[in-house]
């Protein structure tokens, strides 16, 4: 009976170890999409087309969505626009501050008559000096560059004709995913004949470059360490 009980306990421990290993492996393989702050949704479908009309042989058909003389630049929900990312920012700041303060105080007791109560303190003097100084310096600099292209979808047409666009590009490299996201408001007049627009001409632009995978996780602090850093007052 002892041998059977021991064998059963070994099998139970082995089963738990296998299940735990499988769970860890499955969690390691799951790479959730990182959160985003761009306008949602990132893509929409255009409105359902009306019922097709019977062709009558004319050049213009009632069911045609656009005029023959109209260009193909995006202007409706569901249309796509290619955005050229040409972002480059540079900022620098320097600050210096200094302060100096000095003070002194001196006093004494002159000779007095021996009949006075303070005659024994005659000739004593006191002197006090204080000084304080402060000097502070600070500097900050930032240089950022982002270039490339991303094609986005028109998700809404505002009342003044401006287009709200949003889109995402995902690149899978080895065991990690790279996400490029973009959203903003585009003036239809700034769209070129090739249906492109510069990112510097987009209002309320939100540009993101995020990643997921083991390499990204290795650069992040674990939840337990974040917890102890949160409760540590020093």
Image: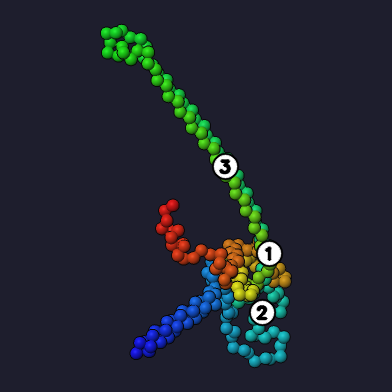
Q: CA distance from mark 1 to mark 3?
A: 34 Å
Query: Disc 1 or disc 3, which is closer to the eye?
Result: 3
Q: Is residue 82 above or below residue 16?
A: above
Q: Say left or right for 128 vs 151.
A: left
Mark seen at residue 137: 3
Residue at x-position 54% and y-position 70%: 34
User: Toward the viewer: 116 or 201?
Assistant: 116
Residue at x-position 58% and y-position 75%: 43
Tell me where residue 87 sits by quadrant. bottom right
Residue 234, percent from left and from top: 44, 52
Q: Secondary structure at mark 2?
A: loop
User: Toward the viewer: 17 or 159?
Assistant: 17
Which numbered disc, 1 or 2, marks the residue that appears first in the sequence?
A: 2
The quadrant of the image that shows the N terminus is bottom left
Q: Say left or right for 34 vs 231.
A: right
Mark 1 nearby-residue class (10 Å; few <14, some 14–19, many ≥20): few
């Amino acid at each position: 009976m002892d041998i059977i009980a021991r064998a059963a306990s070994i099998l139970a421990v082995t089963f738990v170890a296998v299940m735990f290993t499988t769970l860890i492996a499955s969690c390691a393989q799951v790479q959730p999409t990182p959160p985003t702050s761009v306008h949602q949704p990132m893509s929409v479908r255009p409105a359902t087309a009306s019922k097709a009309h019977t062709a009558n042989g004319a050049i213009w058909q009632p069911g045609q969505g656009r005029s023959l003389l109209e260009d193909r630049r995006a202007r409706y929900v569901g249309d796509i626009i290619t955005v050229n990312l040409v972002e480059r920012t540079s900022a620098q700041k320097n600050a210096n501050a200094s302060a100096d303060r000095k003070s002194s105080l001196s006093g004494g007791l002159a000779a007095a008559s021996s009949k006075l109560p303070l005659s024994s303190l005659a000739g004593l003097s006191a002197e006090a000096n204080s000084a304080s100084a402060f000097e502070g310096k600070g500097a900050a600099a930032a240089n950022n560059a982002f270039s490339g292209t991303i094609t986005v979808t028109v998700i809404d047409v505002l009342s003044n004709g401006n287009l709200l666009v949003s889109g995402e590009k995902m690149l899978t490299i080895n065991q990690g995913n790279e996400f490029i996201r973009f959203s903003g408001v585009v003036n239809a007049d700034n769209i070129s004949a090739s249906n492109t627009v510069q990112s510097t001409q987009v209002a309320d632009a939100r540009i993101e470059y995020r990643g997921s995978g083991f390499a990204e996780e290795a650069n992040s602090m674990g939840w337990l360490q974040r917890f102890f850093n949160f409760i540590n007052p020093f």
